[in-house]
Image: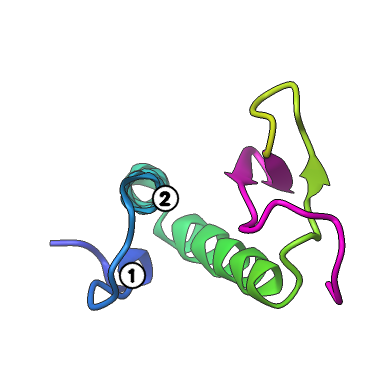
Amino acid sequence: MLPDHCRTDARASYDLKELKARADVKNICIHIGKEQPRSAEKYFANFRRKVELLIEHPRLGERHQEVIRTARMLVEAPFVILYETRPDTDDGPY
């Protein structure tokens, strides 16, 4: 059973990349939480804040075309959030 701070909303429909990303975040949280539960809670809360910022401002992350042509990246040290915007554009209100 996952600790509460590692749970995500399982009701929505996600594509395979999103499911893998969610599993990665849960595994990171669980790994940190084994020895440092409070650090895991803090990390996961910070991670969620970054993701919420991306929902409001999807072009916030810098482009990293050396990784994937459409890749953008935000850092939540020591990890990075690698994502794509759809459509892949720099135009718009964000």
Question: Residue 49 location, x and y as percent?
Answer: 63, 71
Residue at the image position 77 percent from the left and 33 percent from the top: 64
Residue at the image position 85 percent from the left and 71 percent from the top: 92
Whether the residues at callouts 1 and 2 have beta carbons within 8 Å, the answer is yes
Furthest residue to the left?
1
Question: Residue 4 location, x and y as percent?
Answer: 29, 73
Q: Does the magenta stretch include residue 37?
A: no
Q: Earlier in the sequence, mark 1 or mark 2?
A: 1
| Element assignment for label 1 | loop
Find disc 1 in the rendering and name its residue.
8
**CA distance separating discs 1 and 2:** 10 Å
Q: What stretch is highlighted in magenta?
A: 71-94
- Can you say whether 39 is above or below 65 in the image? below
Q: Which amino acid does label 2 sit on?
A: Val
- Can you say whether 45 is above or below 74 in the image? below
- Can you say whether 82 is above or below 13 in the image? above
Residue at the image position 50 percent from the left and 62 percent from the top: 44
In the drawing, what numbered circle is on residue 94? none
Quadrant containing the C terminus is bottom right
Q: Is residue 85 magenta?
A: yes
Colouring method of the image? rainbow
Question: Residue 31 location, x and y as percent?
Answer: 35, 42
Classify residue 93 by image quadrant.
bottom right
The foreground one among 32 and 18 is 18
Classify residue 52 by image quadrant.
bottom right
Question: Residue 88 location, x and y as percent?
Answer: 70, 51
Q: Residues within 10 Å of mark 2 (few under 14, many from 20)?
A: some
Q: What residue type is labelled 1?
A: Thr
Q: How crowded is mark 1: few (under 14 residues within 10 Å), some or many (20 or more)?
A: some
Find disc 2 in the rendering and name its residue.
25
| Element assignment for label 2 | helix
